[in-house]
Amino acid sequence: MFSRVLGTALLCAPLAAQQHAGHFSQADVERGARLYGAHCQFCHGVGGDTVPNVDLRGGRFRHAASDEDLGRVIAAGIPGTAMPPHKFDEAELTGIVAYIRSMRDVNVGAVMTGDAGRGQRVFEGAGGCAGCHRVGARGSRFGPDLSEIGAVRSADLLEKSLLDPTASMLPINRSVRAVTRDGKAITGRRLNEDTYSVQLMDAGDHLVSLNKADLREYAVLKTSAMPSYKDKLSAAELADVLAYLLTLKGVN
Amino acid sequence: MSPRALLVLSLVAGSLPAQVSYDRLLHASQEPRNWLTYSGSYMSQRYSALSQITPGNVKTLEQKWVFQVESLQKLEATPLAVDGILYVTQPPNDVIAIDARTGRAFWIYQYRPAPGSTPCCGSVNRGLAILGDTLFLATLDARLIAIDAKSGKPLWNTKVADYNAGYTMTLAPLVVKDKVLVGVAGGEYGIRGFVAAYDAKSGKEAWRFYTIPGPGEPGHDTWPADDSWAHGGAPIWVTGSFDPELNLTYWGIGNPGPDWNPAQRKGANLYADSAVALDADTGKLKWYFQFSPNDPYDYDSVQIPVLADATWGGRMRKLLLWANRNGFFYALDRTNGQFLSGHPFVKVNWASGLDDSGKPVATPQPPEAPVYPGVQGGTNWYSPSYSPRTGLFYVSAWEDYATLFAPEENEYQAGRRFMGGRPLSPIPRSPVPSIRGFPINTATEAAGHGAVLALDIVTGQRKWKFEMTDVTDSGILTTASDLLFTGGREGYFQALDARTGALLWKASVGGQVSAAPITYEVDGKQYVAIAAGHALFVYGLRE
């Protein structure tokens, strides 16, 4: 009934969806992971997303589409940007590309997944997920959009989010509660914040920007607004939802 | 001399400014209408005697002009202001002469560094030096270029180091007497750092001080007996200072390499993470003070050496003030390098304190525990300021910011990164502030935040703090009207009260501020300039 998805199996699945199926061995990926840590992470970050408009884990690049492009960019650098040239041999370049292509799927534990179709029904029905989360053109925008979640989160991390949402919540997504000087209370999911202002998505799907100087109260809540589904869904339902989430790979 | 002759002389001096002689550089702080060196004077206080803009009228500051550069690389440059002209650099290595009143360019000199050069952290440049009618530019492919300040034409071009071996230059040079002093970057590529002086007329090398002692030299035994000293890093990528009375020039030295694996370079690793005082004529080492021996955290001591003459223990002393990337604020006697005091200015857990000689009492954290301050430090290369009026030292700090370090063995290969492991986020999967900001602050308060700290130079205690939500890489300027100007990653440029830290004025510059402000005066009007994002902004009082 359930398939037991292991890290290595997951590693291969999304690669198969791309044009370079079977290109990379586990040894390539491991070599690439070491090289990435030593040469790339300083600027691109652990998650590959600290350079504006570049998301290595999500497969979003400014100057590359194919594996060949990626290798060329890594070797030659990009003139006029912070990306310097690198002296790598062919095997090393292959390793780094392999690692970048696998970043989204580095899975640490064994996770049960079920039937994606049943999972979608739970997501949109009994689970109440769509009340806060949006997938494609459906659902609320109050919580993080999940349209691409299967492309950027591994199965074990998704399972953790379902069971312990607060521990899995990224700090930027925290709920904020503000009260204006005239007593109006506003709650929402934080989208951005600086010294003088905060930007958020409120429960009515409005983009709201507040000047902190205009607020009587302002608090960032560290507890997730999402309930744990540990006791709300059966193990089978959880596995189905998980399977559904893993199918969400975005519009493109 | 008759009063009439004096009048004629002063008129001539006022209308036909002389070239920027060494004498003018020596007394730069006495002509505050200009900004003649990277840090404003040889003491590097980034303090100006201008006082037309005051806490009372600063609210009427308005934008006078903007100069947009043709690069998507962030600006880190401080302009020079010389008799009504600003000289500034734009990435990668262009020099522009701009009318300080209108923002219109007189000329642009474009230098294209070799494509194989490998700056670790962006194709940045921090500015220029000037002597006579000549500007000096240190390039990303490790060359020093002299440029005619009137025409923008190159006069000479000297190779400083081999870019193929990872050497590069990002700093503004320092002119001392008839020489141009530069240091080399490349601490992430296994270079052997040095400061070198070049004859301003010919470009010929006059002296060179290696920041890692070679075989037979004192301090060489602070490196293993193998060849790790030959690629041990210790770069220099911000500008030094100079004390003409002592004839000493001061420089901050960067981290040893590989950055995060000290087991590969057992020993104190001199003169990495040190302040050095060099004879300005010969480059000979007069003294050194090492802040972080055998550094495992990338705590470059690449900060601006700030010189101050102040009362200490009842008598005037020649001080060297230093808020270090390692999280401690130090006061040294700059005549001899004697340690006077040192106190943490942010959360520090890699050392429990400093002993009587200023050496850290190391408290290494377990492998899975966060180290405070994190890899970018409690502060970094961002220019601090010292106001002789308030007696306070002002520094841009990263507070409550930590990193997990994962050291690894790393074989040296010329021209390749030589880092010895990697830093990790202490918050699983969550971003931490890195070397470049985002328009969206995804790191948030969970990963640390920025602040301007005003420190008492004797006790190291905070007199006040101006906290920011995001971190800051901005330098700081103070003025004789007790104003403090600074920016940050959030795209604001703000004026604070230097005595209280109160916010007096702010403007949106719409991009990360990674440079330091300057102030200058033209036609009796004071201006403040700051590079932010990809543009140079200039403000003046509303008329």
Image (spheres, grey):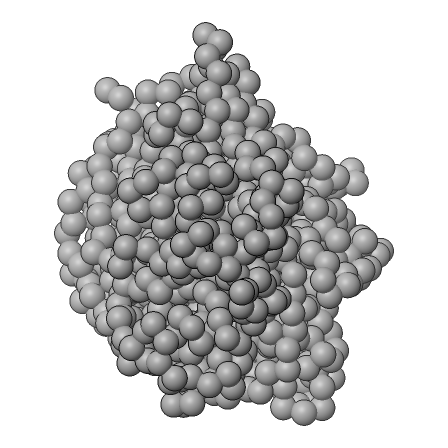
Q: Is residue B281 shown above or below B510?
A: below
Report the side of B130 relative to B484 (left or right): left
Residue at 39% in and 44% down: A145
Q: Nearer the viewer, residue A40 or B248?
A: A40
Residue at 53% in and 61% down: A113
x%, y% of residue A28? 47, 84
Q: Nearer the viewer, residue B11 or B250?
A: B250
> Which quarter of the rendering shows the N terminus of chain B?
top left
Q: Nearer the viewer, residue B430 or B234?
A: B430
Residue at 57% in and 54% down: A236
Residue furthest to the front: A1
Q: Is residue B187 shown above or below A157?
A: below
Q: Is residue B141 shown above or below B171?
A: below
x%, y% of residue A67? 31, 78
Residue furthest to the top: A182
Report the side of B181 relative to B104 (left or right): right
Residue furthest to the right: B356
Report the side of B407 relative to B139 (left or right): right
